[in-house]
Image (spheres, rainbow, N blue to C red):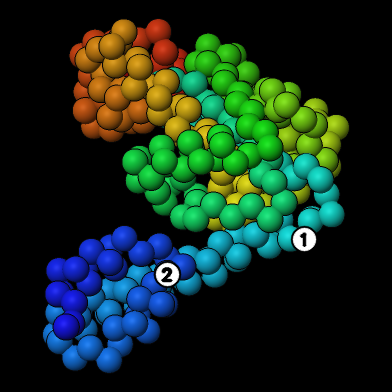
Amino acid sequence: MREKIAEIRKEMQAASIEELPDFIRKYQTDERAGVRALILQAERKKDAWEKELLRLEKMCVYEKKYESWEYLCGIDEAGRGPLAGPVVAGAVILPFGCRIPYLNDSKQLSAKKREELYDIIKKEAVGVGVGIVGPERIDEINILQATYEAMRQAIDSLPVKPDLLLNDAVTIPGVAIRQEAIIGGDGKSLSIAAASVVAKVTRDRLMSAYEDTLPGYGFASNKGYGSAAHIAALKRLGPSPIHRRSFIGNFL
């Protein structure tokens, strides 16, 4: 007696990605329309997974290039452009051969996916460092220098010293570690992508927390960026303690 389609559906849903080829072979001769549809779903899921594995490998060109280096560290930042809040840098050392599915440039990910990946990165990484430079310091030394300062903080907070830094686009001054600046690095290096997620999630959490202490600006939703609602609130309420004075002159 053939299995019911509902039972086959449960079997497919319970199958791991590695088990899908066996599932497809098991039911490939079943001509029922419902089973054919399930096989098609399984094939699409398997194909999507294989494409993801290929994408991951393409994001590990630099990790493979420097595979003889023990501690390869990705560096990236979040928050250079907002009107309010800190700039945050992330530094991440992944173990050799590490592959974290769906890890990508943080800007290409949903907030939910970033949070999920943040937890995985924290669990899998050899080391994670974070640097935070606030708005007063940004106003004092300018955003570029503040970004470099946050990056140096992130490197210094790592539990081990990196042998090589892979940076998203910049060369960090005042760091006695070999560096490679990669244009668009958060989409070309898994280590930099991991750092971008750490920086973005850390900063987003900080900005969301300001919603309670500094209400009215919508920091939980705009994260300090210059949305129309944020600019309107800034004009109505005036600057908060976390606004960057050097950024908001045109709006007041």
Q: Secondary structure at mark 2?
A: helix
Image point (67%, 33%), residue name: 127
**Is residue 139 among the parts visible in the rendering?**
no
The percent coordinates of residue 76 (x first, y second) are 60, 39
Q: Earlier in the sequence, mark 2 or mark 1?
A: 2
The residue at which mark 1 appears reads as: 65
Image point (83%, 36%), residue name: 177
Residue type pointed to by label 1: Lys
- Mark 2 Cα shell of 10 Å, populated few (<14), some (14-19), many (≥20): few
Task: Give the CA distance from mark 2 to mark 1.
Answer: 32 Å
Q: Is residue 94 above or below residue 3?
A: above
Residue type pointed to by label 2: Glu
| Most foreground residue, 205 or 86 | 205
| Most foreground residue, 106 or 240 | 106
The residue at which mark 2 appears reads as: 19
Quarter residue 125 falls in = top right
